[in-house]
Image (cartoon, rainbow, N blue to C red):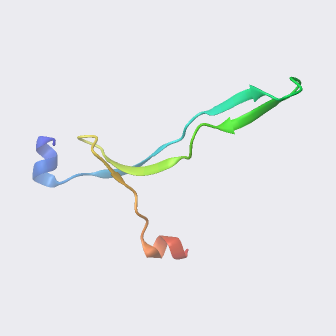
Amino acid sequence: MNFFCRIFGHTWVPHSENPKIRWTASKNMTEMEMSPGAEPRLYLQCARCKQRKEYEPSDERLAS
């Protein structure tokens, strides 16, 4: 943990991991098909020490 995080607390910033899309040839080899590498992931990351925690949206955000 960073010295400033111990004094002031973490500064959480939203981040995401968006895996790259893979392009492959179709069965007839004339078209390209896209397939996702994995699901996008949302998390919070401290701007100072880069510690991560899962993003849990509040009930108010889910309702809107």
Task: Pick out the residue farthest to the top.
Answer: 29
The vertical placement of 14 against 1, above or below, is: below
Write the residue at 16% across / 48% down: 5
The quarter of the rendered structure image containing the N terminus is top left
Write the residue at 78% across / 33% down: 33
Left or right of 12 on screen, residue 3: left
Q: Quadrant of residue 28?
A: top right
Residue 2: % across, % down? 15, 41
Residue 14: % across, % down? 41, 51
Q: Quadrant of residue 27?
A: top right
The vertical placement of 27 against 41, above or below, is: above
Residue 53: % across, % down? 32, 52
Q: How many marks?
A: 0
Write the residue at 86% across / 23% down: 29
The quarter of the rendered structure image containing the C terminus is bottom right
Foreground: 64 or 17?
17
Task: Pick out the residue farthest to the front.
Answer: 27
Left or right of 3 on screen, residue 18: right
Write the residue at 54% across / 46% down: 40
Left or right of 56 on screen, residue 63: right
